[in-house]
């Protein structure tokens, strides 16, 4: 690891513990709600409307909002960031923040994989806005809203995570994970 930033690189196991997406997968690999409580698809306009949970905080205590969602997907779409995930969002034409807990995605055409793509980990806008997300120190000190938070990184040796007591689905049962 040289950086931890799910918008740029696909490091599933650590990203899944530090961050969370609007959707997830259950034990049968079906798409289920995560940061989004629910969603609708307007098939006439290819527009998904996501209704976000209101009980989610980042590891630093700030509230998770629809602005974070918009910021993340736009960062992935930005060619200068060279995200490994950019191709998943090529058909997103417009992202609209309706309010703090509602965000809309208008697609250029139907995309039946879109809900799978929304498992993408969301980044905190309040920590990255106006910064170069490719080189920012955030990539060595990530702040997510997942079940674990980073507590130490001994480069080339180990990455240690501890449970996030304020995780919206309840604190994890395992106190510490060391990679």
Image: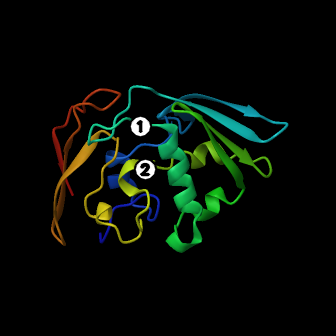
Point out residue 77 in the picture as x, y percentages from the top left corner: 59, 62
Using a 10 Å C-alpha cutoff, classify the residue at mark 1 as few (fewer than 14 neighbours), some (14 to 19) or many (20 or more).
Answer: many
Question: Which image quadrant for residue 145?
Answer: top left
Q: Position of 74 compared to 148: left or right?
A: right
Point out residue 94 in the picture as x, y percentages from the top left corner: 70, 50
Question: Which image quadrant for residue 152?
Answer: bottom left
Residue, disc 2: 125
Residue, disc 1: 64
- The label shown at residue 76 is none
Question: Which image quadrant for residue 165?
Answer: top left
**Mark 1: which secondary structure?**
loop
Instruction: Identify the residue at image location x=26%, y=64%.
Output: 140
Point out residue 97 in the picture as x, y percentages from the top left corner: 60, 39
Q: Nearer the viewer, residue 98 or 139?
A: 98
Which residue is farthest right? 44
Q: CA distance from mark 1 to mark 2?
A: 9 Å
**Mark 2: which secondary structure?**
helix
Instruction: Identify the residue at image location x=58%, y=71%.
Output: 79
Colour scheme in use: rainbow
Labelled pair 1, 2 in contact (Cβ < 8 Å): no
Pointer 1 or 2: first along the chain? 1
Residue 124 visible in image = no
Q: Quadrant of the C terminus?
A: bottom left
- 35, above or below 114, in the image: above
Q: Quadrant of the N terminus?
A: bottom left
């Amino acid at each position: 690891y040289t950086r931890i930033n799910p918008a740029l690189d696909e490091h599933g196991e650590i990203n899944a513990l530090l961050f969370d997406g609007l959707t997830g997968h259950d034990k049968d690999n079906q798409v289920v709600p995560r940061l989004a409580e629910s969603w609708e698809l307007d098939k006439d306009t290819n527009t998904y409307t996501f209704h976000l949970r209101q009980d989610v905080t980042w590891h630093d205590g700030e509230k998770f909002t629809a602005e974070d969602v918009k910021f993340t997907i736009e960062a992935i779409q930005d060619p200068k960031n060279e995200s490994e995930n950019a191709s998943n969002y090529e058909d997103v034409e417009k992202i609209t923040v309706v309010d703090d807990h509602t965000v809309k995605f208008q697609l250029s055409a139907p995309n039946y994989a879109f809900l799978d793509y929304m498992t993408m980990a969301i980044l905190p806008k309040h920590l990255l806005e106006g910064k170069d997300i490719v080189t920012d120190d955030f990539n060595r000190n990530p702040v997510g809203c997942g079940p674990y938070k980073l507590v130490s990184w001994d480069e080339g040796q180990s990455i240690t995570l501890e449970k996030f007591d304020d995780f919206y689905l309840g604190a994890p049962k395992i106190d510490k994970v060391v990679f």
